[in-house]
């Protein structure tokens, strides 16, 4: 019976102080840390400086699993996993897929504590990223808009005259079926015959996410999400103030919104040569949002796993954490961004 228990006991693991993670972290090798966590040592230390105080102040309740302040009095078992280990575990969890037992081996923990520390680390990390400017998800300033417009205009002449600054698209992520029929129906997509969480992301040419609407039921259309999330209103406000537009696909309603340019697979509906050129360039430009979605899921493969259905708010928190962490990584590491992709488009 014990042989069939799918857990790895403490006796079979190293201590966190001598774990593979600690060896990797202490080595100072940038390539190894970027592969494991997605961040180099400078970016990791930036997060750790804000993460560690909260890690020391709060803890996970061993009986309920809730996050609570640590008791002022001493006593109790000392933590074997330090703040760097907890942050590394949380980041590495986003960079992997499947069960968590392999992370327990890497970090020198056992199954249940590993789940607790991942849940604990997610909440601290979101709190930290909300405070850091590198993790902000916000509309660009006027100066940034002009930079984005110039980057797109350098490659797409007609979109430059339309002052396009970004591209928006929806992303569906797999979700576990709920046991309740009405709840299950909200997340069911009849076109693909599966259950999803629908999300909406507006990408700027520098690779960052400028707007997001996440954790919506899969049965809701992208255009409806944009309306309910006030995305149309925010984009139109930029259009009225600065005359800038964004590119969307055919899923979005653009007939009554001058701030949107809808891409098309065919130029048959164009009334003149200029409109046809705009349609073709918009289709090419909208590909940058597809690259953004691919980059988001490629950076955080955990998004490709099917989400467990729950109503505690973990899914909402996870999606916010990933979006902010994506922006943090983009701004800190400066890896290949959509600006370079825009210039590389044929």
Image (cartoon, rainbow, N blue to C red):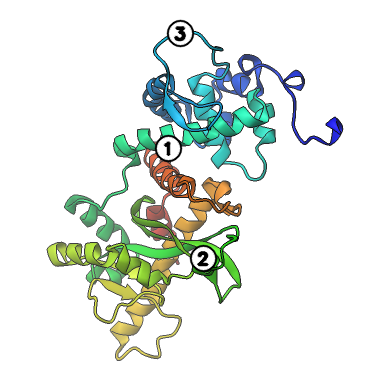
Q: Earlier in the sequence, mark 2 or mark 3?
A: 3
Q: Is residue 57 left or right of residue 188?
A: left
Q: Which residue is mark 1?
A: 333
Whole-percent x and y of residue 67? Answer: 45, 30
At 31% from the left edge and 43% from the top edge, which residue is drawn? 136
At 42% from the left edge and 27% from the top edge, which residue is drawn? 68
Whole-percent x and y of residue 23? Answer: 62, 19
Kindly report the distance in space between the C-alpha atoms of the residues bearing marks 1 and 2.
35 Å
The circle on residue 187 is 2
Circle 1: element type: helix
247 vs 278, nearest the viewer:
247
Is the Cβ of the residue at disc 2 closer than 8 Å to that at disc 3?
A: no
Whole-percent x and y of residue 243? Answer: 17, 67
Classify mark 3: residues with Cα within 10 Å, few (<14), some (14-19) or many (20+). Answer: few
Q: Earlier in the sequence, mark 1 or mark 3?
A: 3
Whole-percent x and y of residue 234? Answer: 23, 62
Residue 249 image-quadrant placement? bottom left
On screen, residue 210 above or below 41: below
Is the Cβ of the residue at disc 1 closer than 8 Å to that at disc 2?
A: no
Q: Which residue is mark 3?
A: 74
Kindly report the distance in space between the C-alpha atoms of the residues bearing marks 1 and 3.
40 Å
At 49% from the left edge and 67% from the top edge, which residue is drawn? 186
Give the residue furthest to the top: 74
103 vs 216, nearest the viewer:
216
Task: Tell us which disc is closer to us: 1 or 2.
Answer: 2
On screen, residue 96 above or below 16: below
Is the Cβ of the residue at disc 1 closer than 8 Å to that at disc 3?
A: no
């Amino acid at each position: 019976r014990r042989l069939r228990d799918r857990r790895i006991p403490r006796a079979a693991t190293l201590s966190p102080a001598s774990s593979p993670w600690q060896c990797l972290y202490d080595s100072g090798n940038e390539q190894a840390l970027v592969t494991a966590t997605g961040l180099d040592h400078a970016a990791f230390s930036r997060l750790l400086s804000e993460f560690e105080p909260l890690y020391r102040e709060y803890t996970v309740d061993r009986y309920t699993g809730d996050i609570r302040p640590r008791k002022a009095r001493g006593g109790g078992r000392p933590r074997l996993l330090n703040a760097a280990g907890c942050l590394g575990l949380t980041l590495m969890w986003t960079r992997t897929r499947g069960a968590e037992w392999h992370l327990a081996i890497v970090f020198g923990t056992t199954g249940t504590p590993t789940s607790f520390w991942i849940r604990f680390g997610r909440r601290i990390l979101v709190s930290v990223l909300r405070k850091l400017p590198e993790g902000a998800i916000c509309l660009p300033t006027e100066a940034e808009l002009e930079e984005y417009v110039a980057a797109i205009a350098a490659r797409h002449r007609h979109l430059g005259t339309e002052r396009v600054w970004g591209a928006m698209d929806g992303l569906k992520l797999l979700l576990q079926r709920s046991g309740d029929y009405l709840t299950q129906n909200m997340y069911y997509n009849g076109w693909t015959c599966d259950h999803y969480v629908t999300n909406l992301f507006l990408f700027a040419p520098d690779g960052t996410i400028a707007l997001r609407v996440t954790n919506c039921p899969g049965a809701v259309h992208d255009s409806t999400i944009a309306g309910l999330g006030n995305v149309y209103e925010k984009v139109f406000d930029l259009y009225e103030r600065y005359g800038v537009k964004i590119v969307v696909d055919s899923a979005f309603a653009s007939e009554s919104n001058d701030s949107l340019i809808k891409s098309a697979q065919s130029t048959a509906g164009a009334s003149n040569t200029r409109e046809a050129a705009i349609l073709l360039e918009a289709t090419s430009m909208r590909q940058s949002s597809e690259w953004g979605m691919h980059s988001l899921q490629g950076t955080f493969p955990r998004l490709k796993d099917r989400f467990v259905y729950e109503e505690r708010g973990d899914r909402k928190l996870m999606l916010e954490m990933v979006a902010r962490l994506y922006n943090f990584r983009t701004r800190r590491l400066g890896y290949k961004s959509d600006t370079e992709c825009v210039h590389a488009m044929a």
